[in-house]
Amino acid sequence: MAPNTSFGVSIQPPPRKEANLVLPTQGTTNPPVFNDAMIVRTRVFIDEQHCSPEGEIDSDDARSWQWVLYSDSDSKTPVAVIRLVPPPQLPHELLTHPDTTNENMSQYDWDHEPCIKLTRVAVVPEYRGKGLGRVLVDAALAWATEHAEEIDQAATELAAATKEAKPKKWEGLVLVHAQVDVEKMYSGMGFTTDESLGIWDEEGIDHVGMFRRLTLKK
């Protein structure tokens, strides 16, 4: 089913650490679009999938871009969201073995090729089956192909803050940590499952790692 063309989309640039991001129920002073994103994320991940409220806002939120889809071009009812996390990403070992304690392990993976990561993709139940997840993935990827410099700058700022060497340039590699029940959907959008990453549990839900390469606009 094709999505209604009257849906509205807003983008939330990285709020930065000083934004003091919190869940919408906690007397929020979040940026308005971020708050709308959290309304969707809370409903889907916390209320429906029973993920931990304490873990819903993480260290990536302050440095990431988010797109929120609204029910129509005039309404401010948020119905879907996606988040784009710039490089670097967390070491994969921390996901597959969260109890690992290694004082020599960096907080971020600076060694592998830089990739952006699409996460927190969520659509409220009554708007599913309309292709809205694909709309948001396409919107985020289209933006990324034209904003490589902004993505590189975000990685450079984090490297400076963590006293790491200047990171490599982002060359269009995209990662998704897909819940296994939507692996086929991402495959249909050009993502390939990396079998070497295995299957791991996040908040009681099995995930796989999938990659796609974008052609960046110069």
Image (spheres, rainbow, N blue to C red):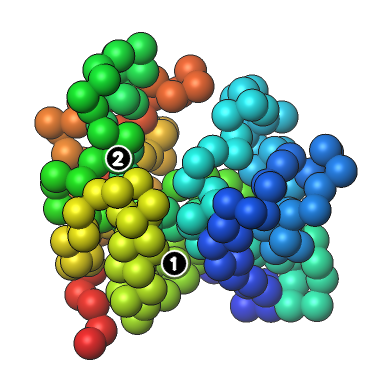
Q: Which mark is residue 140?
A: 1
Disc 1 to disc 2: CB gap under 8 Å: no
- Residue 169 against residue 81 in the figure, above or below: below
Figure quadrant of residue 143: bottom left
Q: Could you tell me the amino acid type at mark 2?
A: Tyr
Badge 2 marks a residue whose secondary structure is loop
Q: Nearer the viewer, residue 160 or 95?
A: 160
Rendered image: mark on residue 87 = none
The type of residue carrying mark 1 is Ala
- Measure the C-alpha gap from mark 1 to mark 2: 23 Å
Give x and y (percent) for residue 60.
48, 46
Residue 66 appears in the rendering = no
First in sequence, mark 1 or 2: give its number: 2
User: Against 100, is 115 above or below?
Assistant: below
Q: Identify the residue at horizontal 25%, vertical 55% (top origin).
A: 115
Q: Which residue is mark 2?
A: 108
At mark 1, the secondary structure is helix
* 76 to 204, vertically: above or below: below
Residue drawn where x is 21% and y is 60% of the image: 166
Horizontal and vertical percent position of residue 155: 33, 59
Picture coordinates of residue 29, whole percent (x, y): 80, 53
Q: In this image, 215 relative to 159: left or right?
A: left
